[in-house]
Image (cartoon, rainbow, N blue to C red):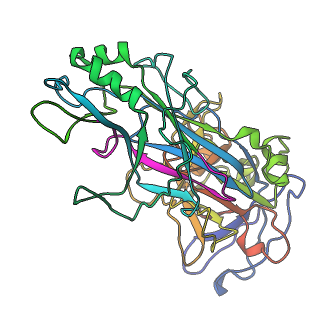
Amino acid sequence: MARVKITSSLLLILILCLVSCKKEYNAIGLDMADDLIGATMDTTSVTAHSVIYDSLITSNLANQLIGENHDPIFGTTAATVYAQFLLSGSNPQFGSNPVLDSVVLTLHTAFAYGDTMAPLRFEVYELSEDLAAGTIYYASNTTEHYGDNLVQNPNVSYFVKPGSSVIINGDELSPHIRVRLKNEFGQRFIDEAGSWYTDDDVKDAFKGLSITATSNHANGCIFSSSMVSSLTGLVIYYHNDLDDGLNYTFTPSDNGVIYNNLNHFNYADAAQDLRRQIIDQDQSNAQTLYLQAMGGVKAKIRFPYICQKFASLNKHLVINRAELVISNCFPNELIFTRPANLTVQGVKKDGTLTYIPDDESVNPSGFFGGTYDVEKAEYRIRITNYIQNLVLDKGDYADYLYLIVKGSGIRGNRLVFYGSNPNAGFEGKQLRLEIAYTPY
């Protein structure tokens, strides 16, 4: 590769368009500063396609997802929570002649993904199988439950309103949903809970709940519930011989188990191009790529020829900056919104996932990026040290990364973005790696 002198410095800015392996060396369009006109330009073949995001751990996350989405591109996703509800303090003492008034499942609402005008109908079941402390639960796991829906009126519709407070007995509370359950279920707590002195006593008598919500709406809605909020719990309302208006709350806690099942139904009703990539496993460079949180879809981005590109420099170079640029295809989407942040998963040569050296958890410099730029409708992720290691063959990194939604286990966003070979007219939006380097 020819070296180019730049009068102001030795810095050469090279845009590496992500193109198919079949287009190994092609000229790229010039969109450079004047002092770079005439520079020798070439490309490095980099490939990208979408894949299933498997093996997402969802156990004991602070937020869990509940509901059902019907996305025109990604198809149907259903989110179910399995949770133990344990003592919120000392064991319940209901007093003389306690009488149940009602039992209510309360669920804090933090965020909504989908259409907040979509009604949800809840299904709540008592678990018949133990949740095991210390077990790692994945988004694909399920736990057995009994068949009786505990919701008192399953036909009642609920609407998720994360920005709207709730008035209870004159008190203004943060957004949450209140699902009334059957009295015969609540009566068990009145009858038995007085002898529950420890969380283990509770677990022996009451294994927990399966909580989900369905929607027949065109779009549906999934919401994020903070399981550590004081507004999430199983509340027993009662009175006794001495007082009215009493209550006791069983809550998810650090001593219990909580996890999400996230079911995408094998993307049976997803868009054809998405299915081609993730189900048919077509690994050719795509015009359009896809990301989905909730253990859904990630993108595999490879740099198979980057070492060959710089071989003529005999490793005498410094990578000053390397940024992965991702452009949103639908910046004005209002229902199924884009993620606030993206990140990458590094991969070792043996296939094990790892952090790359640029990741903020390894190098908290603030330069890693990944935050959405609303004005440019793009994300930039800086992977300078990772690319330097590939070029110099340092470390144990494979020549590919996975691009994912940051916080995929607790968020419901998705993104459709331009691939490395977009349709005509969108060449400036293509997935690309921008590199600035100094030879010496």
Name the one closer to the observer, 363 or 219. 219
- Residue 97 placed where, x, y %? 18, 24
In the displayed structure image, the side of residue 260 where residue 14 appears, left or right: right
Which residue is at 42% across, 25% downward?
A: 208
Q: Is residue 222 magenta?
A: yes
- Comparing 415 with 121, the one in front is 121
User: Vertically, is 61 above or below 436?
Assistant: above
Residue 307 point in image, percent of width and height: 71, 48
Query: Can you tell which quarter of the image residue 55 is in?
Result: top right
In the figure, is residue 370 to the left or right of 295? left
Residue 133 horizontal/vertical position (percent): 40, 19
Verify whether residue 6 appears in magenta: no
Residue 113 visible? The answer is yes
Along the line of sight, the residue nearer the viewer: 214 or 360? 214
Q: Quadrant of residue 253?
A: top left
For the record, the magenta segment spans: 214-236
Q: Residue at x 58, y 71 (%)?
A: 10
- Residue 321 visible: no
User: Residue placed farthest to the bottom in the image?
Assistant: 34
Residue at figure coordinates x 76%, y 53% from the top left? 46
Q: Quadrant of the C terminus?
A: bottom right
* In the image, residue 125 above or below residue 221: above
Which residue is situated farthest in the left direction here?
242
Q: Position of residue 262 (x, y in %)?
A: 60, 38
Q: Quadrant of the N terminus?
A: bottom right
